[in-house]
Amino acid sequence: EPPVFGKMTLFTSSPSG
């Protein structure tokens, strides 16, 4: 999986975003 996907998931998981 590309780094972008991981970043996207992290952002989505975060309440603020």
Image (cartoon, grey):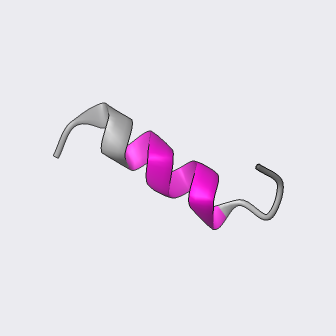
Residue 1 rendering spot, x and y as whole percentages: 16, 46
Examine the image and state in which quarter residue 3 appears: top left
Return the residue found at the far left: 1
Q: Main secondary structure of the magenta part?
A: helix
Determine the residue positioned at 33% across, 45% down.
5
Residue found farthest to the right: 16
Left/right placement of residue 12 relative to residue 6 reads right
From the viewer's perspective, is 5 left or right of 14? left
Q: Name the outermost residue toward the top.
A: 3
Residue 11 percent coordinates (x, y)? 61, 50
| Label total for image | 0
Q: In this view, does 15 lie to the left or right of 6?
A: right
Residue 11: within the magenta? Answer: yes
Q: Give the range drawn in magenta.
A: 6-13
In the rendered image, the residue lying farthest to the front is 17
Going 47% across and 56% down the picture, which residue do you hit? Answer: 9
